[in-house]
Image (cartoon, rainbow, N blue to C red):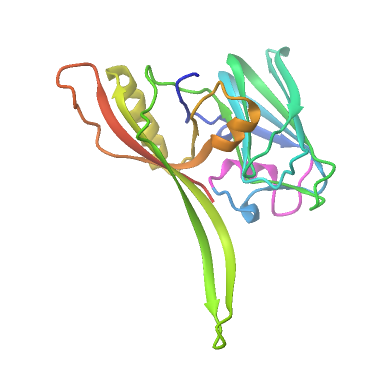
Amino acid sequence: MQNCGFGWENRVLDAAISVSGEVPGLPGTNLRNQHGAASLGWRVPSTGAGLALALSGAAPIRAISLHRTNLSATATWHMELSAGGQGVYAWAGSAAVAGGQCVHVLPAGITADVINVGVDDPNNPDGFLSIPLAFAGPLWQPARNYSTDSTETLTVGQQSTTTLSGGEFVDARYVQRGLSIAHQSYGDADAVVLRQIQRAAATGQNILFIPDPDSDPPALAETALFGRLSGGDLSNPFGPADRHAQTLTLTERL
């Protein structure tokens, strides 16, 4: 098991975006916004989609993910990374979708300047693909892992209406995951990066959290979370030792 990973340098936000198709009003460039709603995302009028990211400069890439999608359980995807016109990494396989998201972690950080991602979902019942959020970038991993005190929450957004006869009708609107990431052993160097991550999050930027980058694809999709992050106080519970404690709150972006 590897230490948890945070993705906060999302190259989707500053890359030149090209897509294989889009519907009016829902272009591929919508991937630059921070909203997970399908009405503000990228929509493809077919069951196959291609996304190309041309980075402004070569950068390390460790994780690639899609979030809040309508991909079905049988979807597949593939990706190719290149640098200076030469291929440096390629992968293809099941998207292993869980909770509308799929996550791929590269074996190591690969420096690339172009990222191509393709998705195929011929059995999608909607007949189109909706991809509101995407991440492509490095993963930062603290020197030591998070605490078992960490917890997960599930917020169910619904409205219940009760008729005069006692009938109850529930209108389900959303299900939102949340994580309380307790860490009691950050080092001084970790604290420096944490401040950078929280400054980025304070601008409204979504942060990717992967509890175990070593997990297989189904577990990655099931446990990863992409959303809004905030942090509590950074404390010094062990005196002069190079150990700091902080609890981060991460809420899935809807």
Is 9 rendered above or below residue 88?
below
State left or right for residue 129 relative to residue 210.
right
Determine which quarter of the picture holds residue 25: bottom right
Counting labels gives 0
- Residue 28 is inside the magenta segment: yes
Is 19 rendered above or below residue 192?
below
Instruction: Judge whether residue 31 can be spotted in this image.
Output: yes
Is 175 rendered above or below residue 59?
below
Instruction: Judge whether residue 15 can be spotted in this image.
Output: no
Question: Which of these two is toward me, 5 or 1?
Answer: 1
**Residue found at x 30% / y 23%:** 185
State left or right for residue 248 relative to residue 77.
left
**Residue found at x 19% / y 26%:** 236
Question: Which of these two is toward me, 54 or 2?
Answer: 2
- Residue 86 is inside the magenta segment: no
Q: What residue range appears in magenta?
A: 21-34
Predominant secondary structure, magenta span: loop
Determine which quarter of the picture holds residue 193: top left
Determine which quarter of the picture holds residue 18: top right
> How far across and how far down the image is residue 67, in percent?
61, 41
Is 132 rendered above or below residue 108?
below
**Residue found at x 54% / y 77%:** 161
> How far across and how far down the image is residue 51, in percent?
72, 34
Given the current orientation, which residue lies at the most extreme left position? Answer: 239
Given the current orientation, which residue lies at the most extreme right position? Answer: 122
> How far across and how far down the image is residue 167, in percent?
58, 80
Given the current orientation, which residue lies at the most extreme bottom position? Answer: 164
**Residue found at x 52% / y 38%:** 225
> How far across and how far down the image is residue 173, in percent?
57, 62
